[in-house]
């Protein structure tokens, strides 16, 4: 009986997905943020695959654009097919800022999985991970990330 169990266990382990990661803690086949596709329109940048990116990271486009524009430091408008940024920004810079957004607002800080959702609880934006159950207040995370260390040490 022990050998049958061991054979079944080996078979189950062989069928598990790989533990390889793509650098952000998520499995390769499970979660990859697409690279932005942009073009210039006058003195503006148009992100053509904005809706695809929002769907991939599991965020409502309105919620996504609210924080993403703050990270980019530019105004912007959503159209039916794209996001139009108020100035020219390189694809490389947008991709760096997108990865920053994903690390701050998509990936769980405890388990690294993208199974999160942002909700409002007691007038605060809270990111909840459905994989491990962690909850994190978003505004506090940004505040602490941007404060200098003396302020943090003084108020601990």
Image (tube, grey):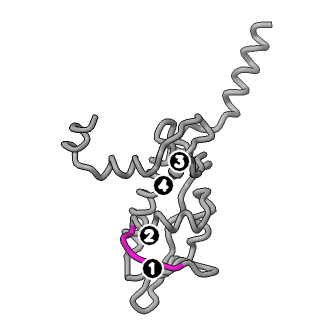
The residue lying toward the viewer, choosing from 98 and 31, is 98
Q: Quadrant of the C terminus?
A: top left
Of the two numbered discs 2 and 1 on the same chain, state the one appearing first in sequence.
Answer: 2
Q: Are marks 2 and 1 in contact (CB under 8 Å)?
A: yes
Q: Are marks 2 and 4 in contact (CB under 8 Å)?
A: no
The residue lying toward the viewer, choosing from 75 and 81, is 75
Q: Find the residue positioned furthest to the top.
A: 1
Q: CA distance from mark 3 to mark 4?
A: 15 Å
Please name the residue that numbered disc 3 is placed on. 126
Please name the residue that numbered disc 4 is placed on. 102
Q: Is residue 77 left or right of residue 15?
A: left
Image x and y of residue 140, in percent: 40, 47
Q: CA distance from mark 2 to mark 1?
A: 8 Å
Q: Which circle marks residue 85 in the picture?
A: 1
Q: Which circle marks residue 69 in the picture?
A: 2
Q: Find the residue positioned furthest to the front.
A: 122
- The magenta span reads 72-77
């Amino acid at each position: 009986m022990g050998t049958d169990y061991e054979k079944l266990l080996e078979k189950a382990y062989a069928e598990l997905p790989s533990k390889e990661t793509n650098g952000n803690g998520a499995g390769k086949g499970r979660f990859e943020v697409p690279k932005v596709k942009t073009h210039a329109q006058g003195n503006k940048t148009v992100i053509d695959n904005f809706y695809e990116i929002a769907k991939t990271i599991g965020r409502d486009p309105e919620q996504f654009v609210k924080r993403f524009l703050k990270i980019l430091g530019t105004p912007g408008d959503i159209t039916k097919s794209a996001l139009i940024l108020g100035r020219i920004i390189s694809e490389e810079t947008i991709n760096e800022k997108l990865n920053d957004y994903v690390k701050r607002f998509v990936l769980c800080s405890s388990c690294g999985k993208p199974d999160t959702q942002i909700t409002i609880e007691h007038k605060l934006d809270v990111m909840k991970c459905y994989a491990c159950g962690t909850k994190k207040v978003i505004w506090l995370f940004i505040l602490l990330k941007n404060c200098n260390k003396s302020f943090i040490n003084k108020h601990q």
